[in-house]
Image: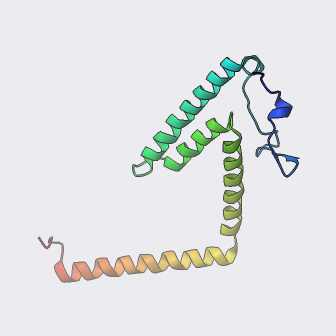
Amino acid sequence: MSVRSDKERVATVAGTAVEDGAGRPAGSRAPAFVRRSPALHRAWRVMIFVAGLAVVGAGVLLLPLPGPGWVVIFLGMGVWATEFTWAQRVLSWTRRKVAEAAHRAMDPAVRRRNLAITAAVVVLIAAAAGWYLWRYGLAMPW
């Protein structure tokens, strides 16, 4: 069993080399001495997978809890992206979608709409709180 070179590792889609978000060819970022030994490279990949899984798992646990759940999940994906092409593609797609969403959010019409929706929700909450205080006062109903 031979270890493939970096050029052979570069994934291809429709005949063109796949690149990560930084313009580097997709594939393993393991040091050269690790890539030379098949057993060491396999162990390296397992270690990267387990480390990424631990970080992603911590992010999933943080989703319902107070904390930066999505940020931690994407950090775990970044750990995986150092070794796995599929994770590099997922991160590249995610970066592209976040940039598109940020660009759309800066549109003045969208900002006005979001402000109007926020104002309407605040007015509804204030009206509900006012009704509750008028109906029950500060005493709890139970």
The C terminus lies in which quarter of the figure?
bottom left
The N terminus lies in which quarter of the figure?
top right
Check the image and report above or below for 99 versus 20. below
Which residue is depicted at the point 78% across and 39% down? 26
Which residue is depicted at the point 82% across and 43% down? 23
Which residue is depicted at the point 24% across and 79% down? 132
Farthest residue to the front: give it: 1
Check the image and report above or below for 110 versus 100. below
Residue 20 rendering spot, x and y as whole percentages = 77, 44
Q: Based on the displayed image, in which of its 4 quarters is residue 136 positioned? A: bottom left
Which residue is depicted at the point 52% across and 41% down? 56
Judging depth in this view, the residue of 131 and 142 nearest the camera is 142
Looking at the rendered structure, the number of numbered marks drawn on it comes to 0
Check the image and report above or below for 61 versus 111. above
Farthest residue to the left: give it: 142
Residue 125 rendering spot, x and y as whole percentages = 37, 76
Residue 123 rendering spot, x and y as whole percentages = 41, 80
Judging depth in this view, the residue of 120 and 96 nearest the camera is 96
Q: Based on the displayed image, in which of its 4 quarters is residue 108 positioned? A: bottom right
> Is 27 on the left or on the right of 58, as rendered?
right
How are the residues colored? rainbow
Judging depth in this view, the residue of 115 and 142 nearest the camera is 142
